[in-house]
């Protein structure tokens, strides 16, 4: 799975994901133009989006009604190097019986690709490309 990004303006980047785009930038108070959320905010949104998608799939597979679910994803900072030391996902759903919601949260926590990846840790590397990448090139969707 690959996502392409390209610079937009002085401080923003645009991620091209299938037929979607996401603009990321720093707020003006941090030297950006506030054209979109910061990368860390986008990471938290990715955790929440993957978690909610997995929760909904688990609910459908079990015929559990989930119609108004919400989640709040909080990243707690650690120092040196600055990063998230932990991430907490809090889920609410008024249409789902509490015991069923507990079970769905457990299933989603195990099944969410993004959360599972972060929990296991991984190498993150960077290199210089042989040729410039272009945001208009199709992203490799891969298997999810």
Image (spheres, rainbow, N blue to C red):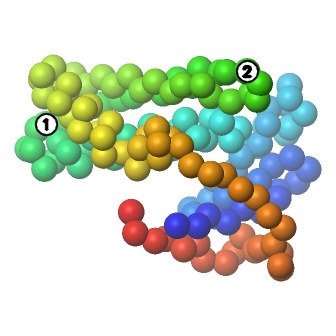
Q: In which quarter of the image is residue 44?
A: top right
Look at 52% across and 67% down and name the residue there. 1
Q: Quadrant of residue 103?
A: top left
In the rendered image, residue 33, in percent from the top left (x then y), is placed at 85, 39
Identify the residue under disc 1: 65
* Local SS, label 2: loop
Q: In which quarter of the image is residue 97?
A: top left
Q: Is residue 98 left or right of residue 119?
A: left
Image mark count: 2
In the rendered image, residue 84, in percent from the top left (x then y), is placed at 62, 28
Identify the residue under disc 2: 79
- Nearer to us in this view, 123 or 96: 123
Residue 67 appearing in the image: no
Q: Is residue 3 left or right of residue 107?
A: right
Q: Is residue 62 left or right of residue 127?
A: left
Q: In this view, does 10 lie to the left or right of 132?
A: right
Residue 43 appearing in the image: yes
Q: Are there few (<14), some (14-19), or many (20+) residues within 10 Å of tag 1?
A: some
Mark 2 and mark 1: span between their CA atoms? 41 Å
Farthest residue, direction left: 63
* Local SS, label 1: loop
Q: Are there few (<14), some (14-19), or many (20+) residues within 10 Å of tag 2?
A: few
Look at 25% across and 25% down and name the residue there. 93
In the rendered image, residue 9, in percent from the top left (x then y), is placed at 88, 54
Look at 58% across and 67% down and name the residue there. 2
- Nearer to us in this view, 124 or 129: 124
Compared with 79, 31 (above or below) is: below
């Amino acid at each position: 799975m690959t996502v392409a990004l390209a610079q937009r303006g002085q401080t923003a980047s645009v991620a091209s994901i299938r037929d979607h785009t996401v603009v990321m930038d720093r707020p003006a108070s941090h030297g950006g133009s506030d054209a979109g959320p910061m990368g860390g905010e986008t990471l938290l949104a990715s955790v929440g989006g993957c978690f909610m998608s997995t929760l909904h799939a688990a609910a459908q597979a079990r015929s559990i009604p989930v119609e108004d679910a919400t989640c709040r994803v909080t990243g707690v900072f650690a120092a040196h190097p600055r990063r998230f030391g932990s991430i907490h996902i809090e889920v609410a759903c008024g249409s789902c019986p509490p015991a069923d919601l507990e079970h769905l949260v457990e299933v989603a926590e195990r099944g969410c690709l993004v959360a599972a990846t972060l929990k296991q840790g991984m190498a993150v590397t960077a290199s210089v490309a042989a040729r410039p990448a272009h945001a208009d090139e199709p992203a490799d969707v891969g298997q999810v």
